[in-house]
Amino acid sequence: MLGATRYSEFRRASRVRERSLFVAVPAPSELELQARWFAGDFGRQFRSVAGDAIEIVQFGVWNREAGPDFTEAVVRSNGGAPIRGAIEFDLTDRSWESHGHATNEAFDGAVLHVFVQSGGSAFFTRTRTNRNVPQVRVDLAALNGLTPVGLPLARAGRCQAPLQGLSEERIVSVLTAAAQFRLQRKAARLRRIMESHGRDAALFQELAAALGYKRNKLPFTLLAQRVSLAVLRAAPREAESLLFGVAGFLSAPDLAAYRSDTRAYVRELWDTWWRRHDEMGRLILPLALWKFSGARPLNHPQRRLCALSLLAADWRGFVRSFVGYDFRKTRQFLLGLTHPFWNFHYTLRAAPAATAMALIGESRVRDIIANVLLPLAEAEGHDGWSDYAKLSAPLSNRRVETAATRLFAQDDRRKRFTKSIAFQQGLLQVYEDFCLQDNSDCAQCPFPEQMQTWK
């Protein structure tokens, strides 16, 4: 897609300035960074602090017990033979010593120490036998798409005036190119995860993130990584209980806390989960990770967790639904997911609704197709863009409306630029690349001037 290449150059040119115009995105938590590392978002090729070329051949297994963060990983140094061992991921380089890794036998087999922030001076990362562990510093700038939280409400940007004077054809060209760039970036990310974990596991993780929406993407991703698709497919009748248990939603065995019409369902979940608790209890997510406020009741994470369990239980049927990348059957499959409890409940403690509710609605189905399945098609060499461009957007969201306000204010053509998923994705890409990176209240943002040069 030539448009994506042009937009990539357009985007990169905005970073060439005599002085810094952009501020760093606030650092995510260590847990989120570990999830991004495990997904391959930082890449696979690195340069160690000593100057050695480090390649991650295999990311290994995420260890939730005491010891290194990732076990059974495989790395290669300077093109040499693959080395199997553990990888530790910390926020700072000094954490190796301050956390006691140097004297902990569990770290004797470590082959790599990954960190984000440097203390400024080099030091020897040692094991108990004084073996040096190579260190790699990762760059948060590699995490494309991270969005700072707590952004103020939007107001019209400086670009809206010059954009009003541009032809619709030119604006459509820019938004299309930005959307193509975004699609290719998502496809590249999915391809990295598939290389590390396989097609099914990668697809399951991305589906989980899509069901988590903006506020709960992290816990859903962590959940899909901790309770793998392989585990769920091996015990499809237990999938629902395992996911609810590891999510931390079955921590209170007292049935009196639930409504009388809910207790039988919770008891069934609990009885199954308790049999696996000793084995999997160490994987339970902290409840503080979940965000329950600020979302529509239909989007409550417990309802979406049920949908994820149904997908895992009938994974073969789900995958068959998009053979040949024809997503019409996929739409029917997702819209047809049903559950005797969750079709009528918002949460485990809520009163039943009077009428049935879809587990996954039309707008979320389109979002899954746009943000998971079409990037998958693109990653596997199929032309995902032609189908991507045809997807209409029945709903907008706050971020899209914020981007539209910044760029177009009350321009009469604004609705035209938000009615398709492709245009919405293009808007979001421009918003992330320029609006969210500008620290001058629009005064020095290069986008308005660069738009004049777009042909």
Image (cartoon, grey):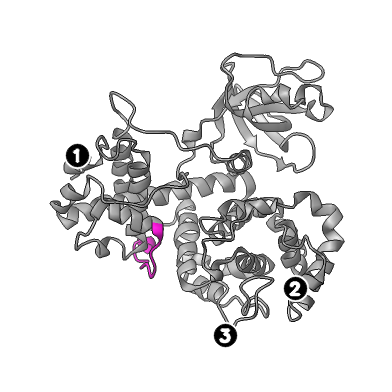
Secondary structure of the residue carrying numbered label 3: loop
Which residue occupies the extreme bottom position in the image?
A: 354
Q: Mark 3 points at which residue?
A: 355
Indicate which disc, 2 or 3, sits on the residue closer to the N terminus: 2
> Which of the 4 image quadrants contains residue 83?
top right
Mark number, residue 258 = 2
In front: label 1 or label 3: 3
At x 33%, y 44%, the residue is 435
At x 44%, y 56%, the residue is 382
Q: Is residue 264 left or right of residue 151?
A: right
**Which SS type dominates the magenta stretch?**
loop
Indicate which disc, 1 or 3, sits on the residue closer to the N terminus: 3
What residue type is disc 2 on?
Tyr
Q: Badge 1: few (under 14), some or many (20 or more) residues near its Cα, within 10 Å?
A: few
Which image quarter is the C terminus in? top left
Q: Mark 1 points at which residue?
A: 449
User: Could you tell me how far apart the alpha carbons at marks 2 and 3 are, in whole angstroms?
Assistant: 21 Å
Indicate which disc, 2 or 1, sits on the residue closer to the N terminus: 2
What residue type is disc 1 on?
Glu
Taking depth in this image into account, of 153 and 239 the one nearest to the observer is: 153
Taking depth in this image into account, of 150 and 428 the one nearest to the observer is: 150
Residue 277 within the segment the image draws in magenta: no
Please state the extent of the stretch shown in magenta in the rendering: 386-398
Residue 398: percent from left, percent from top: 40, 59
| Above or below: residue 140 compared with residue 147 | above
| Above or below: residue 33 compared with residue 82 | below
At x 62%, y 71%, the residue is 317
Residue 394 within the segment the image draws in magenta: yes
Discs 1, 3 touching: Cβ within 8 Å: no
